[in-house]
Image (cartoon, helix red, strand yellow):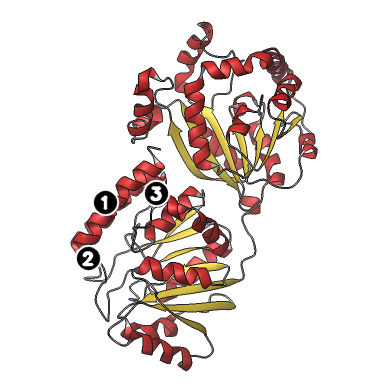
Amino acid sequence: MQKDTPRSSERKARIRDLSDRLAPDRSRWWRRAAFFHEEDIRYLRFLVPEGAKVLELGCATGALLAALRPGIGTGIDFSSRMISEARALYPNLEFSVADIEDPEWLSKVSGTFDYVIIADTVGSLDDCQATFELLHTVCDRHTRLIIAYYSYFWDPLLRLAERLGLKMPTEEQNVLSTDDISGLLTLADFEVVKRDWRQLVPVRLFGIGSLTNRFIATLPVVRRFCLRHYVVARSRRRADDNLRSASVVIPCRNERGNVEAAIQRLPRFCEDIEVIFVEGHSQDGTLEEVYRVRDAFPEWNIKVLQQDGVGKANAVFKAFDLARGDVLMILDADLTVPPEQLDKFWRAMASGKAEYLQGTRLVYPMANKAMRFLNLLANWVFSVLFTWLLNQRLTDTLCGTKVLRRSDYLRLKENRGDFGYFDPFGDFDLIFGATKLNLKIIEIPIRYASRTYGETQISRFRHGWLLLRMVVFAFRKLKAF
């Protein structure tokens, strides 16, 4: 292990001594900054569901860890007095004394965790990259590392608050922006999946602080001036979980002329492919055609379902619930997204480079008359809105081709009700759910083709109004919570 430099060792000793001295009064300082901590916990609870297995590094007296209500909670801190306070306050949680820059701390924990949290402690580390590299041992494919820190833009105000006795004293901290933290994580083989900025007003101010933080602080540009910033990452070394099979779900309503072509053009991108047609009360003989195609292509594992409800979402989720593949794929029966493109989606998912894949029709030139002007305009507007809402660049939220792991769908399904049940297509149920799970989302450009049979099932104005309602709903759930 690389030894600390004399200067860094001196700083670390000062930080430890200060932590020991402040330990008995930590709860009092916490109460003094109650609004800041309430807002911080509110956002972290959005990221970390109750009952998860959580490891906090630099846990102090354990207040944050306890507030997250973990099913299994483990805290590590190098201040023995902080840990003594934590054990007395939260006997249901597990706490250990260790320096998280020393690999020996790994002997204090066992197994992997759902979430690893480093709140502010990153400012005290002597070598952030080396510390991050140690964390792969406690990560699996689902683990999310969450780093919370403050914006150095606020440093003069925070130092003034310390002098006035309004903030707990600290030693000199590292100067780290979200870009700096993201870069260090990349060097340590972690991949950033989300960044966010919160708390433009860290004091209550008779309710003004709360209103400002919910409705103004999250706006583009403005949010970069917030006090608190967050980076969520995943271990690239644990990204591959040996995917072997896929289920291709094809919802079809009045698509008789496209059914056979869907099978003929579908590539054998992996050894075990299950194809599930879900027929939705067609009037043109689609159901009979699906059965005929199933019998005509016995070399394919084709299953046929009939909707018991209405709408594409009902069809897709019915099939997902019965699918057995490691990877779930949606292929629209209109074939405007070429079936041949699914090979790209499989390779991206199987490599571990993505956990949720979304097709985008707005990169490559599309076929003539493939998308009407108003539809194109609506797609552009929604892409801008949802890029902001999700903190994730999405150019085509309405593309029907979406791919995710079945294991992630099952987790997503548990929380689907959080975003309501009024999306008839299921597009936003999946996008919102993937965002809530902090999945690595990537778009894959596809060449959008014109329909050769049938008519679109989408009403531009009726469904457009519904999508606007969903934007408002998403703002309340993802930004103004």
Whichever of callouts 3 and 2 sits on the residue coming sooner in the sequence is 3
Residue 447 in view, yes or no: no
Q: Nearer the viewer, residue 469 or 449?
A: 469
Instruction: Name the residue located 37 percent from the left edge and 18 percent from the top edge.
Output: 205
Residue 383 in view, yes or no: yes
Q: Is residue 428 above or below residue 9?
A: below
Q: Residues within 10 Å of mark 3 (few under 14, many from 20)?
A: some
| 336 on left or right of 161 | left
Q: Give the numbered dot on residue 468.
A: 1
Residue type at numbered disc 2: Ser
Instruction: Determine the secondary structure under disc 1.
Output: helix
Q: Is residue 188 above or below residue 60?
A: below
Viewport quadrant of the N terminus: top right
Q: Report, in whole angstroms, how far the alpha carbon at label 3 lies from the one at label 1.
A: 19 Å
The residue that disc 2 covers is: 459
Q: Quadrant of residue 453?
A: bottom left
Cβ–Cβ below 8 Å for labels 3 and 2?
A: no
Cβ–Cβ below 8 Å for labels 3 and 1?
A: no
Residue type at numbered disc 1: Leu
| 254 on left or right of 441 | left
Q: Residues within 10 Å of mark 2 (few under 14, many from 20)?
A: few
| 448 on left or right of 416 | left
Q: Give the numbered dot on residue 274.
A: none
The residue that disc 3 covers is: 393
Counting from the top left corner in percent of width and height, residue 145 is at 60, 41
Counting from the top left corner in percent of width and height, residue 451 is at 27, 76
Instruction: Name the residue located 61 percent from the left edge and 18 percent from the top edge.
Output: 27
Viewport quadrant of the C terminus: top left
Instruction: Name the residue located 70 percent from the left edge and 47 percent from the top edge.
Output: 112
Counting from the top left corner in percent of width and height, residue 86 is at 70, 25
Instruction: Name the residue located 43 percent from the left edge and 19 percent from the top edge.
Output: 203
